[in-house]
Image (cartoon, grey):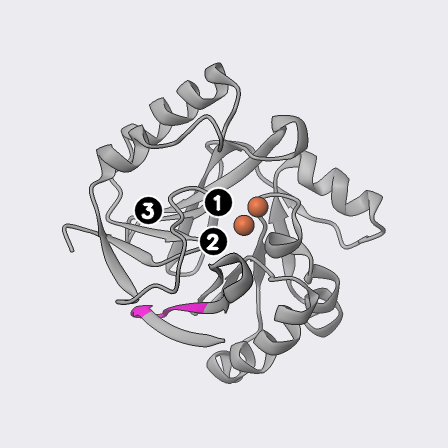
Amino acid sequence: MEAIPVLEDLTQFQSYRAPIDLTFNQYLLAGSLPILVHTGDMDTAGELEPRVRSLLGSRLLAFIVISHFESDECGGLRRWLDRFPEASPVCSEVTARQLAGFGISRTALVRKPGELLEAGDWTLEFLAYPAEMHLWEGLVAFERRRRILFSADLFIRRGLPRPAIQGLVWRDEVEGISPAQVPAPDARAALQTTLAVLPVEYVAPGHGPFLKAGA
Ligand SMILES: [Fe+2]
Ligand SMILES: [Fe+2]
C-alpha cells in the first residue's frame, strides 16, 4: 500500500493487485472533521488503519463515506466502526438497508442526491450513482470547495498508475461512461447529464490514478 499526498489534506491510499491489474484506492480528507472515503475490504482496512491513525494524530475520524455496497467500498466497515466508535457511516438509503441487513447496526447518516455533508473545511454534495445490485441508488460525492469528484467505480483506469496524478478532459470522461458500467440507457443518460454540468477540477476514483483537469 502506498500513501500519496495528492492535495493539501487529501491522501490517496493505493493498493495494486497484479492478478487483476487494478489498484484499490481509499482517501482520507484530513480536516478538523476527518472523512474516510471507502473502507477497503477487511484485509485492506487492517493495513490502512495505522496509516490513517498516524495522519489523524489526535483527531477523531468523523465520517466514513460509502458509495455503494461492495467489499472494496465498505467490506472493512465493521472493523472501522469497532475501532473508531465516534465515526458515522454516510451512504444512500439503499446502502443503509444493506448494512443493517448484514448486522452493522451503527446508524448511518443517509444522504439523498443533492444533499450535503458539511465537515469543517470540506463540503460534500452527493449525486445519484446507479451502482448497486439491480442499479439501485448509490452515491458519488463532489467536494465543492476544491472541486473534487469522489467517483467510486467511475473514471477508473487499469494498471499501476505512473505518474500517480494524471490528466483528464472532463467532457470526454463523462461521454466515456460505458454501457458496461451502467447498463440501463436511461440511468446512464441521467448520470451523464448530472455530471456534465459539474465544475470538476479533480477526480478521485476508487481504482486507478488521481486525475487533474489540464494535467
Ligand atoms: Fe464498486
Ligand atoms: Fe470499486
Q: Are marks 2 and 1 in contact (CB under 8 Å)?
A: yes
Q: Dot 2 corresponds to which residue? A: 206
**Which residue in the structure is indicated by mark 3?**
144
Q: Is residue 67 left or right of residue 93?
A: left
- Circle 1 — which element? loop
Question: Label 2: how many residues lie within 10 Å, few (<14), some (14-19) or many (20+)?
Answer: many
| Residue shown at 51% from the left, 85% from the top | 54
> Picture coordinates of residue 155 (x, y %)?
37, 44
Q: Residue at x 83, y 43 (%)?
A: 101
Q: Is residue 31 visible?
A: no
Query: Which x, y percent locates residue 159?
Result: 39, 59
Tell me the SS state at disc 3.
loop
Residue shown at the point (59%, 50%) measured from the top left: 66
Select label 3 or label 1 by which is in front.
1
Which amino acid is tagged 3? Arg
Tell me: is circle 1 under 8 Å from ligand 1.
yes
Q: Position of residue 156 (x, y in %)?
A: 40, 48
Task: Write the start and end of the magenta stretch as one range.
Answer: 6-13
First along the sequence among labels 3 and 2: 3
Residue sitting at x 28%, y 54%: 211
Q: Label 1, on which residue? A: 153
Q: Disc 3 or 1, which lies upstream in sequence?
A: 3
Q: Would you say residue 167 sits in the magenta stretch?
A: no
Give the Cα distance between marks 2 and 1.
Answer: 6 Å
For the residue with label 3, is its CB less than 8 Å from the closest atom of ligand 2? no
The CA span between labels 3 and 2 is 19 Å
